[in-house]
Image: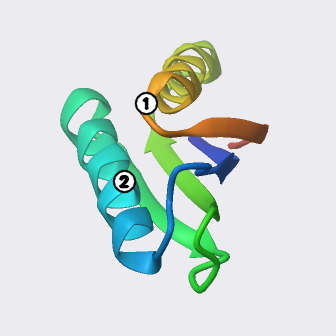
Amino acid sequence: MVGVARVELFLPACQNLKEKRAIVKSVIAQLRHKFNVSAAETDFQEQWQRTELVIAAVANEIPFLQKELNAVVRLVEMAPGVELIRAETEYYE
């Protein structure tokens, strides 16, 4: 089973790409360390205050993936300097 979360974020304090990339890199590192998931910035790479992250997890049960990805989205939502615009999750067998 594979679960994929796509989160779109607003980064209101960023004034340049360097600041944005520091925040995005920090969030991705936290996700990988705490949840052992794969994560990448997939859209809006050249916009200062907006980004999209895609996070993927693999498990043998959909309920576990749902719980894990819900926790992932909560962690992203609570990251400093980040406002959640939208979050979508999909599951594949």
Of residue 54 and residue 13, the one placed in the foreground of this image is: 13
Q: Position of residue 74 (x, y in %)?
A: 55, 19
Q: Which mark is residue 23?
A: 2
Q: Name the side, left or right, on which 57 lies relative to 28.
A: right
Can you tell which quarter of the image residue 18 is in?
bottom left
Taking the spot 27% from the left edge, 44% from the top edge, the residue there is 32
Residue 73 place in picture, x, y as percent: 58, 28
Q: Which residue is mark 1?
A: 79
Residue at position x 60%, y 19% in the image: 70
Mark 2 neighbour class, 10 Å CA radius: few under 14, some 14 to 19, many 20 or more: some
The vertical placement of 72 against 83, above or below, is above
Q: Residue at x 50, y 60 (%)?
A: 14
Farthest residue, direction bottom: 46
* Residue 41 pos. (x, y %): 51, 68
Q: Secondary structure at mark 2?
A: helix
Q: Is residue 68 above or below residue 5?
A: above
Which numbered disc, 2 or 1, marks the residue that appears first in the sequence? 2
* Mark 1, other Cα within 10 Å: few <14 / some 14–19 / many ≥20: some
Query: Which quarter of the figure has residue 39?
Result: bottom left
Amino acid type of the residue that numbered disc 1 sits on in the rendered structure: Ala
The reply to whether dot 2 and dot 1 touch (C-beta < 8 Å) is yes
